[in-house]
Image (spheres, rainbow, N blue to C red):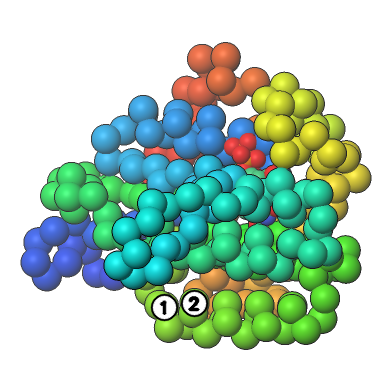
Amino acid sequence: PARGLQSTGPGPRPDGRARVRRVSIEGNIAVGKSTFAKLLQSASSDWEVVQEPVSKWQSIESRPSEGSGAPQQTVGNLLQMMYEDPKRWSYTFQTYSCMSRMKTQLQPPPPHLLSSKGTPVQVFERSVYSDRYIFALNSFELDCINPAEWAVYQDWHTFLVEQFGPQLELEGIIYLKASPQKCMERLGHRGRPEEGGVELDYLQKLHMQHERWLRERSTQLHFEKLKHVPVLELDASVEFLSDQTVRDEFIVKVKDFFS
Ligand code: TTP
């Protein structure tokens, strides 16, 4: 059974407000992270989901020079650019996805969580860690990020994560696991236009990266705190959206994990 969430400190904060803990949902492309996140969101007012900013990656906005009064314009779909020409755009994509993630992760928790009398938890879709140890690393191994780009990425990533420290730390990880074949099937059903060229082989590689990261994170050179973060693994190959029994089981497991 999974160990429960790590405690970040001795009970409530000195100001009497609740200590909000942070958890990320990890898993392959199209495994169902957003669906699962919505399920958690509706299960308890003490759980607040922070969605992944995919739509921002799909429409990059220009930044008009100060005082010009020019309206913001959409200047590109970085997700599409990355899939069409991975060697050219993977580094840029990973830079942007990680930065947009840091921005959302650094936002203070909403007031209702801070005033909660229960055990408030903020749940993020993915994290700055999977950005690096799954996607950016995979792109490097596939030669879509070159050695110089990889060195630069690792340098700023380590620097920023160390600088922001506690604000980016996680107290737990929920890993939604399903076979790459199952994820391929779901990816086909959802039909996100940019993902039309994604092949099973790519999902297999990402699956291996997830498995490797979660298995080896305690022995690799990782951020110290991440080594001991408990992981709740859920079998996401079942149809958890339509099956009430499975949904209830998931919620019970998550409650146990969070308590
Ligand atoms: P996911 O973060 O896997 O989101 P999803 O919508 O596929 O998740 P789910 O269906 O489980 O809710 O990826 C979104 C898209 O962005 C996907 O095409 C993969 C791509 N991507 C990268 O290429 N690199 C990254 O670092 C991340 C986070 C996503």
Q: Residue at x 27, y 54 (%)?
A: 109
Q: Residue at x 80, y 34 (%)?
A: 196
**Hey, what amino acid is under mark 1?**
Gly
Describe residue 79's horizontal placement relative to residue 173 as left or right: right
| Residue 170 in view | no
Horizontal and vertical percent for residue 155? 62, 85
| 1 and 2 marks in contact (CB < 8 Å) | yes
Horizontal and vertical percent for residue 231? 57, 54
Horizontal and vertical percent for residue 245? 53, 16
Label count reads 2
Q: Residue at x 36, y 29 (%)?
A: 43
Horizontal and vertical percent for residue 35? 53, 30
For the residue with label 2, is its CB less than 8 Å from the closest atom of ligand 1?
no
- Element carrying mark 2: helix
Disc 1: CA contacts within 10 A as few (<14), some (14-19) or many (>=20): few
Describe residue 69's horizontal placement relative to residue 59 as left or right: left
Disc number placed over residue 161 in the picture, else none:
2
- List the residue tagged with mark 1: 165
254 to 129, vertically: above or below: above
Q: Residue at x 67, y 83 (%)?
A: 152
**Viewer-nearest residue: 103 or 130:** 103
179 to 125, vertically: above or below: above
